Image (spheres, rainbow, N blue to C red):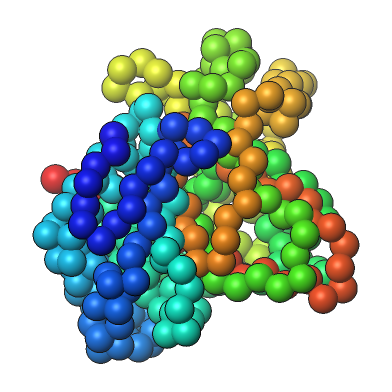
């Protein structure tokens, strides 16, 4: 899976060979500054084609090898995840540049969904000491259990990108991830009678979704392997059978010994296949000055 692309340092992640690390060289980053500066954030938000323009600028610097490589990783069941970041944060790389870089990477693998929470193709949100929101997303001192994205929306969510834009006074808050094929109880839960039943999935007001959807927790890919669509906060079990199944599922995921716990530096984007990778976050250590800003893009693969 490791390839040689000039200007990009590519290695297996130190915690798992399922995750590919891609570091972007200073030379590539400097060459991106001009094409990225052609469009401000408002242009990217209002004119969808500009997002593809900056994505092409990034891909052209790799002789169009990067897009092929990223798609190869994200669709491969054996990997399905990469972490891409600047080799080092130079002064010209600010949070605006990182939004554009994240946008470019996302548009090399697919089309982003409209994010109803933010009203855009992406969402930015802060995690701080105090929080009055209605979901775990911004609750710094609560464990965010393993989950997939898009469980409560009608759009397909094939992939997810999460970027760290800023971080201050942070201890803890590590990223947790688990590949379905490494989960000790996947087969047991996949074959549970409740696993293929339709569950009702809602969402809190902050998500700005005015409907509910129904779908099973588990499905199968074209090779018959398990796929999952699950988050602990939003299912509405219809009966005892579904309620106890969800409890068993939640406990089993959180007790897994094969979770990957990693600390991501500012500027990093983790991109994962949303069908067989689950993700979460460890609690932060309490600090009244704590601040982390994240960016999220999620969407569907290009149809070739």
Q: How many dots with numbers?
A: 0
In the displayed structure image, the side of residue 41 where residue 185 appears, left or right: right
In the displayed structure image, the side of residue 222 where residue 95 appears, left or right: right
Query: Residue 85's spot in the image, x, y percent?
Result: 43, 61
Q: Residue at x 24, y 42 (%)?
A: 3
Location of residue 222 by image quarter = top left
User: Closest to the observer: 244 or 125?
Assistant: 125
Q: Can residue 146 be seen from the camera position used here?
A: yes
Q: Residue at x 21, y 57 (%)?
A: 6
Query: Residue 161's spot in the image, x, y percent?
Result: 45, 55
In the displayed structure image, the side of residue 116 where residue 59 appears, left or right: left
Which quadrant of the figure contains the C terminus?
top left
Query: Residue 109's spot in the image, x, y percent?
Result: 28, 52
Query: Residue 237's spot in the image, x, y percent?
Result: 70, 32
Relative to 249, residue 40 above or below? below
In the displayed structure image, the side of residue 104 where residue 217 appears, left or right: right
Which quadrant of the figure contains the N terminus?
top left
Location of residue 120 by image quarter = bottom left
User: Closest to the observer: 100 or 139?
Assistant: 100
Relative to 298, residue 35 above or below? below
Relative to 253, residue 59 above or below? below
């Amino acid at each position: 899976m490791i390839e040689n692309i000039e200007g990009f340092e590519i290695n297996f992640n130190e915690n798992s060979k399922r995750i590919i690390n891609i570091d972007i060289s200073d030379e590539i980053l400097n060459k991106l500054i001009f094409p990225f500066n052609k469009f401000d954030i408002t242009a990217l938000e209002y004119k969808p084609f500009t997002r593809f323009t900056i994505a092409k600028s990034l891909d052209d610097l790799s002789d169009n090898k990067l897009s092929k490589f990223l798609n190869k990783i994200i669709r491969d069941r054996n990997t399905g995840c990469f972490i891409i970041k600047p080799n080092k944060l130079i002064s010209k790389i600010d949070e605006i540049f990182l939004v554009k870089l994240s946008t470019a990477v996302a548009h090399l693998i697919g089309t982003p969904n409209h994010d109803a929470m933010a009203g855009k193709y992406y969402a930015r949100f802060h995690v701080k000491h105090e929080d009055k929101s209605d979901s775990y997303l911004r609750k710094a001192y609560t464990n965010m259990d393993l989950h997939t994205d898009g469980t409560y929306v009608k759009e397909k969510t094939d992939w997810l990108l999460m970027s760290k834009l800023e971080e201050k006074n942070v201890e803890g808050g590590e990223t947790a991830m688990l590949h379905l094929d490494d989960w000790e109880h996947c087969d047991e839960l996949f074959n549970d009678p409740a696993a293929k039943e339709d569950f009702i999935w809602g969402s809190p007001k902050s998500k700005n979704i005015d409907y509910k959807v129904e779908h099973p927790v588990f499905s199968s890919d074209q090779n018959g392997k398990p796929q999952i669509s699950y988050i602990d906060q939003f299912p509405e079990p219809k009966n005892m059978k579904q309620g106890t199944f969800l409890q068993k599922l939640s406990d089993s995921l959180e007790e897994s010994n094969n979770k990957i716990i990693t600390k991501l530096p500012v500027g990093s984007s983790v991109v994962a296949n949303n069908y067989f990778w689950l993700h979460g976050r460890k609690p932060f250590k309490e600090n009244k000055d704590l601040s982390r800003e994240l960016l999220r893009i999620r969407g569907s693969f290009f149809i070739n």
